Image (cartoon, rainbow, N blue to C red):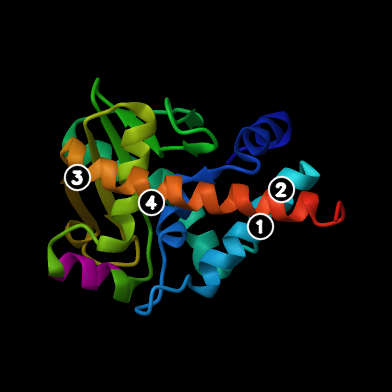
Amino acid sequence: MLEGDALAAFLRARCGKLTASRMATAMSFKKNGEPTAERSRLLRELLAERLTGDSVRHYVNDAMQFGLDYEDEAKAAYEDETGQLIMPCGFYDHPRIDMLGATPDGLVGRDGLVETKVPQSETFILWKLAGCIPQEHMPQMAIQLACTGRAFCDFCAFDPRQRNPAHRLFIRRYEPPRSEIEVYEAHAERFLADLAAMWEQFTTSDAA
């Protein structure tokens, strides 16, 4: 876990930017086409970061803290299962889209990434029985690939609560075509355009 100067640098790199971890929220709309409350809140949050220069700190509940506590164990389980070493990495800005970035959980080999999740047991069971990458995590992984230029991202879910160690790991590879990544990039650009319009409205509201 980052601390001190490293944490401060990490927060500065992300401040005011749409990041891969928030991508699903950025493209969240109701059936009638209206943005969800979560998307609108994210717009205000990033606007606040741009206006103040301070990153909004998020509440970490018990489930989230559990995931953070076991992230290293999840990575070790992935390495043992695949024989691939996970290399640490930092924040990547998108090469073309301004104010879009990603912080992958790690680099794998020359062309890959890994995204680790330590969910609640019922969620882990759901994912493992379905046998595929959960749809809600594909936007995050797609933007990570877009920002890093890598070819694939391994989705790695880990549940240390399972009594049988053989049941604790679920790995699936996400290797989308460029056309699929472009769909997510278009959603990111739409969100960032909405954010720019909100900035313009806020910063010029007193000029009239």
Residue where numbered disc 3 is placed: 174
> At 61% from the left edge and 51% from the top edge, which residue is drawn?
197
- At mark 4, the secondary structure is helix
First in residue order: circle 3 vs circle 1: 1
- The chief SS type of the magenta part is helix
> At 69% from the left edge and 50% from the top edge, which residue is drawn?
199
> Is there CB contact under 8 Å for labels 3 and 4?
no
Of the residues shown, which amino acid type is indicated by label 4? His
In front: label 3 or label 2: 2
| Residue 151: in magenta span | no
Of the residues shown, which amino acid type is indicated by label 2? Glu
Q: Residues within 10 Å of mark 4 (few under 14, many from 20)?
A: some
Q: Residues within 10 Å of mark 2 (few under 14, many from 20)?
A: some
Residue where numbered disc 1 is placed: 45
> Is there CB contact under 8 Å for labels 2 and 1?
yes
Write the start and end of the magenta stretch as one range.
124-129
